[in-house]
Structure formats: structure tokens, C-alpha cells
Image (cartoon, coloured by chain):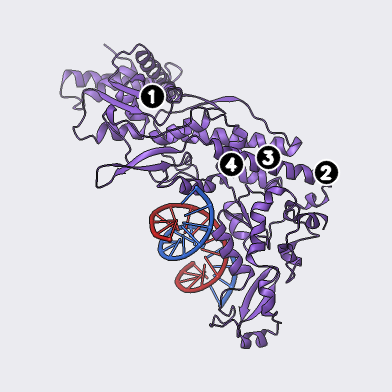
Chain colours: A purple, B red, C blue
Amino acid sequence: MENSPVEALALARSAPVVGRCAVGRRALRSLHCLVVFCRQPQRWFNTADITVAHQNNLLKQLNQQRRQELFCDCSVLVEGQLFRAHRNVLFASSGYFRMLLTQGPDGLPDTVNAAFDAFTPETFTVILDFIYSGQLDLSSHNVIEVMSAASYLQMNNVINYCKNFIKSSLDISVKEEDSDRCLSLSETCSFTSGAGEDSTDPQQQGPCSVSPPPALWTRDSSLSQSGFIGKDPEQDASALALKTNPNSPTNEVSADADGLQDPQDPLYTLPGSERRRSRGGTKRRAPNSNRSSQHEDLDVLETRTQKAEKAEELYATLPPIVGVIGHFNKDSNPVMRFKCPFCTHTVKRKADLKRHLRCHTGERPYPCQACNKRFTRLEHLRSHFETIHQARKLVCRKCKCQVTEETGHVVCEGTRRYRMCTACIQEVGCESIPIDSLDGPLDEPALLLGVNGEEEGDTKRSWMVNDDDDLAEDSGTDLIIQQVDDSDEELQ
DNA sequence: CTGGGGATGGGGCCC
DNA sequence: CGGGCCCCATCCCCA
């Protein structure tokens, strides 16, 4: 009796001691047939077809069983709604469930119950449907919640699909922004998974992927996950796209190539390599942008304002600031931590999370008025300004010797200022500038004017550095721009 | 090619 | 909760 190749494989696997028993001999014969069949694919079908067909069929069967609640040995309670599933499927799909099912104190129990308040039943439905079908039903309205839930459940493949969804939305946004400054995107799209196992392929890991989160699980529904999540994000995915995954190559290349990324942009983020390359200088706009009309500039300003507003909107409506129990303190009270919706990072304070989010959104609210470089934090701006533009370091730049306010002569190089000792000054033959001018136009209060003033729109005129008014190159020691007068600056 | 230093970014935590 | 400080990691430039 001959077996089919699939049966042969199964038989062979179940009878490892091939040849020592009848079953083993039968398996061996069947396996021989399989080899023959595979060598003549036109007579049979190749193994890849078998595998795919088998996987599809198996997944379909499992999904049917789930829907009919057949053999379900796992209950998941999400905000009061009960979901039945198979623990082996959940185990294979989610790092969270892997930990839940393997690291429990009592080994594998007969039934497993998990409860979540960190996401909605609708979100978990999307996740569960994906687990059992490979189809991820994403839309602009649920992508953040799904991504947050996937992050919570440690499903890297879903996270990556969500990132791709957001990135694709970004592409659409950028292209449309380039053409008619109009933001829109497709409302829904569906991603198909190639495999149910969550991906650990580093290439699929987004730039915001970090180390696995701490074990945040419970095997007792009474110890449900504490936390909260917005129920109605109402988020424009285009806004999310503009703010999400700033390091994505798509974002960088498309935006930068089109000259759309501007250091003046509150959401501006330097690409990984560009970030370093542009240090100490001013990122110029594309040459052709110099010839853009005033009308176009106004459109650009309007677009930036829209971006800033959307950033604020995102922060205001940001639902997935998920409070999670990080660990228990000495009094056995849960210590709440806040989880980033874009990665697995958790922080103690919501304010820290907001600060952390800037590394995902690319928001840089603190522009340097001297060189237009933008920073995510005021302290970074201040540090940069003191170091680069105020020559606060009492070290000779040439010979590295210690100098004082008196002996360290300030040398100006564009907007950059540094100190040199008397000997080096004479050796180089350059001129120092009076110390008095250091705290003149470049004093900090003026510097910081741009932080809040940027939203007024007028100061943005100075952000659009072109060949004619490149501050970094031409302003020299006369950094008058610190005397922020929006109306005057607009006219310059 | 390599190591040191500068500039920058990001996390933790205190005030 | 924002501001600020400290610390560390990373990247880049330069000798």
C-alpha cells in the first residue's frame, strides 16, 4: 500500500526508528515514493504547494474551530468580552502568550485565562482574526490601537505591518503634499501575513523596536492588566504618518528628496546619516526652492502649521498611553509605568513618555535661532547654543589649553564661536571679537523666543534659509536675528 | 585604520 | 508637570 507524500512524511516523522518495524518500513517505502514524485513534479505537485495548501487548510480549520468554539482551551477576557481560542495558536503567535503559557508558576494549567483592559475588544478582534487568518484589517482609525495592542502582545509582525501601513500613509501624504498640499489617504487597507509566527527578522524590525518588554502578564483574570486606552482615537492617519517612524527610509528619502523636510519644520528630523553630516551647519533647501514664489512659501508655512497642529492633536488625543504594571514595590503595590505606543519602552511618568515620543514623531520644537538647527529638548538647544554659538567653553580650540574669560579670545566662524589662547591667536593670525558682543544679540532669552514664537508663523520666514540669506554662512558675528521681531524679519 | 574628542540624542530622576 | 541636571551611547571628524 502506498501513502501520499504528506502521509509519508507524517508517518516518517512518527516512526523515527525507520526500518526496525513494519510501520517504519512502510514509512520508508512511502518516503521513497515521495522522492520519486518530487523528482517528477509534473506527475505530482511540488512540496511547496503541499506546504502552502496544508498551511492554508490548517489555518482555515483552526479558524473554523475557533468560531465554533471547538477544542478551545483558552479564554481571553477583554473589557468584559470573552474570546475563545486555542492556546497553541496563541502561543505560536504572541510573545506575550508565550510567556503567559510557559512561565507560569504551576506549569501548564488545564485552562488558561487572560484578561486585558489595555485595549478594546474591537482591537483584539482584529488581532485574533489576524492570528487565525493572516489577514490584518487595518484602517486609519484603528492602526494605532492595533499597533499598541500588538506591542503589548509582543507580536512584532503585526507591529511591522502597522508601521508599514503608517509609512504607506506617509508616502501618500508626502506625495499629495508635494502636489497640492492636500492631505488625504486611503481609509483602509489590509495586510496579509506570510506566516503566523511573529517575525524576528531584524530587517522587519522598525527603528523603534527595542528590547522585549518586561513580563506583563497574569494568569488570573482577577489580576487583569491595569491600564487605560482611548476608545475613540479619531486620528487622521496622515497626521500619524507625519509624526510616526521618523527614521523610516521612506520618510527620509521621499521627504528629503523633495525638499520637503526643513530644519525649520517642527516635525523636522534629520535622517540618520544626514543628522551627523549637517552638524554645525545649516540645512539648505533644495536649490529650486529658492525660486519658489512667495505664494508657495505661504503654502509651505500653512502646511507646517498644519503639521504642528496635527502633532498637537495627536498628543491631545493620543490614546495608547498605556498604563501597565511594571513591577511590584516592597509593599506589594503595583508600580504603574507608561508604555510607548510605538515601541516597547516604558517610563515612570507620562511626561517622560511625552518626551520619549518625540524620538518617534520627529518633532523638534526647539529651533536654534542662530543656525536653524532644531532640537527635541530645550536643554539640548541650550547646550548646543552655549557650545557652538556662545563660546562658553573656556578651552582653546587649537591647543586645548585652559583659558579664562580674559585670556580666551573669542573667534567667530560663521555663527560658530570658540575661544583661542593668545598664542594660538597670534599664530593663526585671526582676529578675536570683543567679549562684550558675546551676550548681546545671542543671549538666551532671545534665543528662546523662537520656541513659542514659531507657531506665530512670522518667524518661520527666517527658517527658509536660501542662498541669499543663509544665516549660517553670512550672518557672521551679527546675529541680529536674535532680536526677534517677526514683522521685520518677515520683510528681510 | 584607529583612537580620542566633540556634538548630539535619549533615559532616569530630582526639584 | 515642566525644567533641569546627570549620565551614557552613538555618530562623526580629525589627527
Which residue is disc 2 drawn over? A295
Instruction: Answer yes or no: is residue A307 visible.
Output: yes
Foreground mark, 4 or 1, reads 1
* Distance from the alpha carbon under mark 4 to that under mark 1: 29 Å
Indicate which disc, 3 or 2, sits on the residue closer to the N terminus: 2
- Residue beneath label 3, please? A306
Q: Secondary structure at mark 3?
A: helix
- Amino acid identity at mark 4: Lys
Circle 1 is placed at which residue position? A79
Residue A396: image location, x then y, percent: 58, 80
Across the whole image, how many numbered discs are drawn on residues?
4
Q: Position of residue A214 (x, y in %)?
A: 34, 42
Q: Residue at x 38, y 13 (%)?
A: A67
The answer to whether the residue labelled 2 contacts the one labelled 1, judged by CB atoms less than 8 Å apart, is: no
Observer-nearest residue: A133 or A2? A133
Q: Nearer the viewer, mark 2 or mark 1?
A: 1
Q: Chain of mark 4?
A: A
